[in-house]
Image (tube, helix red, strand yellow):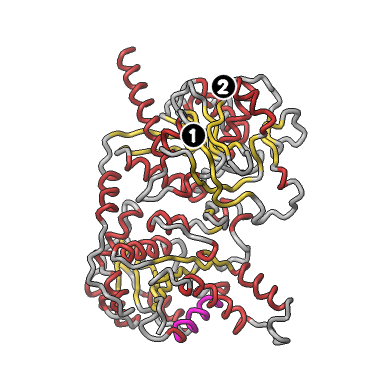
Amino acid sequence: MANTKYVFVTGGVSSSLGKGIIAASLAKLLQARGYRVTIQKLDPYINVDPGTLNPYEHGECYVTDDGAETDLDLGHYERFLNTPTSQANNVTTGRIYQSVIEKERRGEFLGKTVQVVPHITNEIKERIQILGKSGNYDIVITEIGGTVGDIESLPYIEAVRQLKWELGDNNALVIHLTLIPYLSAAGELKTKPTQHSVKTLMESGIKADILVCRTEHKLSDDLRRKLALFCNVKQEAVIESIDASTIYDVPNLMLEEGLDTVVLTQLVLRDDNTPDLENWNNFLKRHKNPKYEITVGLIGKYVELQDSYKSILEAFIHAGAENEVKVNVVSIHSEFIDDETIEKKIAHLDGILVAPGFGERGIEGKIKAVRFARENKLPFFGICLGMQMAVIEYSRNVLGLKGACSVEVDENTLDPVIDIMEEQKSITDMGGTMRLGAWDCELIGESKVFEAYGESLISERHRHRYEYNNKYKDQLEAAGLRTTGINPKTGLVEIIEIPDHPWFVGVQYHPEYKSTVANPHPLFIAFVKAAVAYSKRSKSAKVSQG
C-alpha cells in the first residue's frame, strides 16, 4: 500500500473555472487538519516553462526559491499553504518531452521505439510521484491543466488512469471541476454539459470520484441527486462551488460542503480532527472589515490582464488586511503617461507601485511617474524594473546625467546606470537563464527596509538580467540616493531609498512572491502603512485649506 495518497484535479466544460483555487482550498483544509500536503501543476503546453511567455498569454511567471519559472497557480498554492514550492511542483509537456528525448539520445531505452505510451506516460507518472516519494507529504494534490477532451491533455489523463490503477483503491482519487451554467431564458441550471464532460473523462478510462460544480446559483437537492445518478458519484460527492466575493472565502465554502470529509473518507484517512482555520478567518475578518481606505496606482505595461501582476495584487490584499485597510488598486498603463496626463493620472493617489517588466515599451512613462512621486513626497515602491527606473530618474534629474539609461533600453547610452550582469553577456538562450530564485541580502541599519523587516539578513526571490551599475554608486549616494541593501556574495545593489522622503523604496527582487495569508510581506505592509499616513495628511491639509 502506498504511504502517500494522491488527489487529481481535472477540469471540464470550460477553462478558467478555478482548478487552482479548488486545489489550494482543499489543501488548506487538509493542512488545517494536521496533514502534510503539497500541490503540483501539470501544464499541457509545449514551452519548457512560462519564462519566455508574454504575460498577456499566460499571466505572471511565478518564481520559486530554487529558481524555477513556473505557472501562476503555484503562487496560489504558496499563499494558501504558506509553504514554499519548487521545480517539482510544476511540470510542462515541454519538460516531459525534453527529458524523454534526452534519455533516448543517451540510449536509455535500449533501442526501443519511443512512444507516447509507455514512455511519455511513464515520465509523467515519475514526475507526479517525485513529491510523494520524498517522504515529506501525506497527500499530494495534482492539478491537470486544460480541459478534459483537449488533445494536449490526453497523455496526462492516460498517465492518471494508469497511476490510479497502480496505486490501488483508497490511495488515489479524481476530483472533476465542472460548470453548471444558468440559462436565464429557461430560468434554470443545466446539468447536461457536466454529464458530457464526465462521459468524456470516462471514455479515457477515468471515473470521477468527486464532482465540484462551479455555479452562480445554489444547487438544489434534486439537481445534486440527478448529477450523482447520471455521473455515477455519491450524492455527498457532488460539491457546490458557488461564486465567492474573494478567493479566500473558498476554503470555508468547501468546508461547509464537506469536500475535505469526502476526500478523507474515500482515501481512508482519519477525519476526526476539526480544521484549525482560526488564523485564516482572522485574516478574512480584517480583510472584510477595513477601518480605512486608500487608493494605490499600479504602473505597468501589462495592466490589461489582471493575472500579469497577480502576486502583487494578492500581496496588497494581505498587507491591507494586516493594516485593517482596504487597498483599491488602480491599474495605469505606463505607455500613456506623459507630461500632460501625469497630474490627472497620479496626483489623486495615496501611493504608486512601479511594476516589473521587460523591454523598452512604456519606460519613459514609468520614469515620469517616479519623478512625480519623488518630487511630491508620494509613497513610492519600485519592484525590479521599477527600482531600475528610480535609479535612472534620479541619475537624470538629480545627478544631472541627462542621458542616463539602462542598456536594455539603449545599449549605446553614455551613462549605463543600469547594466547587464557580467555573467549574462555571453548568454544567447532566453529561457531559464536570468538570475533566478532566492538570494541573500544584507540590510543597512536605520533604513525603511530594516525597520520593515526587523532583521539585517534577508532572502528574496529574483528574476532579472540587468542590475544597478556599481560604478555610479558613490555619485548616487553622494546625491542622496542611498543603498540600503546589498547582496553579500555578489555585491549587487538590491535596495535603494531616499532618506528624506516619507517612503521611497526600490528593490531589485520580487517581494510579492513571498507574501502569504499567514505572512504578509513586510515591505507591502510598510508601503500600505505609508500610503495611509500620506492619505490622512492630504485629507487634513485639504480640511485646513478649506
Quarter location, residue 185? bottom left
Determine the secondary structure under disc 2: loop
Q: Mark 2 points at which residue?
A: 480
Place of residue 392 in the rendered image (x, y in percent of width and height, measured from the top left): 63, 29
Q: In this view, does 31 lie above or below 238?
A: above
Q: Name the residue furthest top.
A: 545
Q: Mark 1 points at which residue?
A: 381
Magenta region includes residue 528: no
Place of residue 477 in the rendered image (x, y in percent of width and height, measured from the top left): 60, 24
Q: Residue at x 46, y 79 (%)?
A: 200
Q: Distance between the residues labelled 2 and 1?
A: 17 Å
Q: Which residue is drawn at 57% across and 72% down?
A: 152
Name the kind of residue labelled 1 in the image. Answer: Phe
Question: Is residue 468 left or right of 234 when viewed as pictured?
Answer: right
Place of residue 491 in the rendered image (x, y in percent of width and height, measured from the top left): 63, 39
| Part of the protein shown in magenta | 154-165
Q: Do the residues labelled 2 and 1 touch (CB within 8 Å)?
A: no
